[in-house]
Image (cartoon, rainbow, N blue to C red):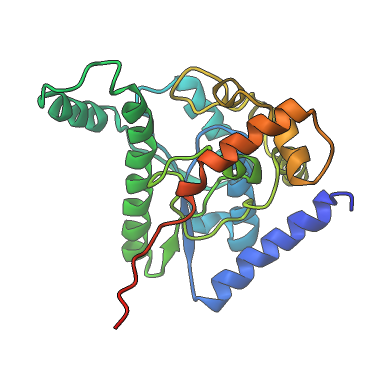
Amino acid sequence: MKFDAYRETDRIIQFVRDYYKENNLKGAVLGISGGKDSGVVAGIMCKAIGAENVVGLTLPCHSREADRNDALLVAERFGFEMMNIDLTNVFDAFKEEAMKLGVFTADEVKNSDINLKPRLRMASVYYMAALMSAVKGGTYIVPGTSNACELYVGYFTKGGDSVYDIAPIYSLTVDEVIQVGEVLGVPEKVLYRTPDDGISGLSDEDKLGVKYEDIGKLIRGENIDEREREKIELLHHRARHKFNTPIYKYEK
């Protein structure tokens, strides 16, 4: 069935409204990266619960100023409050303590450095959600901004952007996220920007070695090149540990 962006946008907004009503929630705090996923989720939340109940955070950490500028475009378009918490010094202090152990080389810590940033950001978002809950007298929760393509290949950080309270675009592929963004009116500069993590200097597709278009086709059951299918399925297989936590059950 052809994706109907207008219908799905309305259904997602209603899904969020229903959840907030059922659980007596008030607001949302989310990180705004300047990319399409957070831009679309911000738009959805504003439409669902009102821009006055949405707080966006820019959380730079050795980041590009352009990312924050693009994030501000999203806030201006949808009218929600933006706050900035610079995590650069926090990151540097953590790194300094870790390197004092004297057992790791600069090359060995590169991947840990990359993943530390989203983990610090998630801690910050939840800190602000708790703070806003206290200040506003109602519960603020954290929406997730991962899309179906990223999730399928495990392109997220455990304990970082994998942590959230509601997932508005969880089942949408990248092209579907863009279509919903067009319906919502997400700024074009944000919506059509080449996706990247803002950390490594590489695009998402460069890092993954596969194209989001092919991941989306595979998810929808469409035909793709067999070599690309194998690469995507290998990424999916390797990421299984991110979705399932083995639990030992004591038999009493």
- Which residue does the image show at 58% across and 62% down from the upper left? 49
Expressed as whole percent of the image width and height from the top left, the position of residue 52 reads 52, 56
Q: Nearer the viewer, residue 83 or 17?
A: 17
Residue, far front = 251
In the image, residue 115 sits, relative to residue 140, either above or below, namely above
In the image, residue 129 sits, relative to residue 193, either above or below, namely below
Q: Can residue 171 be spotted in the picture?
A: yes
- Which residue does the image show at 89% across and 49% down from the upper left? 2
Residue, far right = 1
Give the quadrant of residue 147. top right
Q: Nearer the viewer, residue 102 or 241?
A: 241
Number of residue marks: 0
Give the quadrant of residue 233. top right
Expressed as whole percent of the image width and height from the top left, the position of residue 228 reads 71, 28
For residue 25, side relative to residue 178 (left or right): left
Expressed as whole percent of the image width and height from the top left, the position of residue 118 reads 39, 38
- Which residue does the image show at 30% across and 75% down from the upper left? 250
Q: Nearer the viewer, residue 228 or 149?
A: 228
For residue 3, side relative to residue 96 (left or right): right
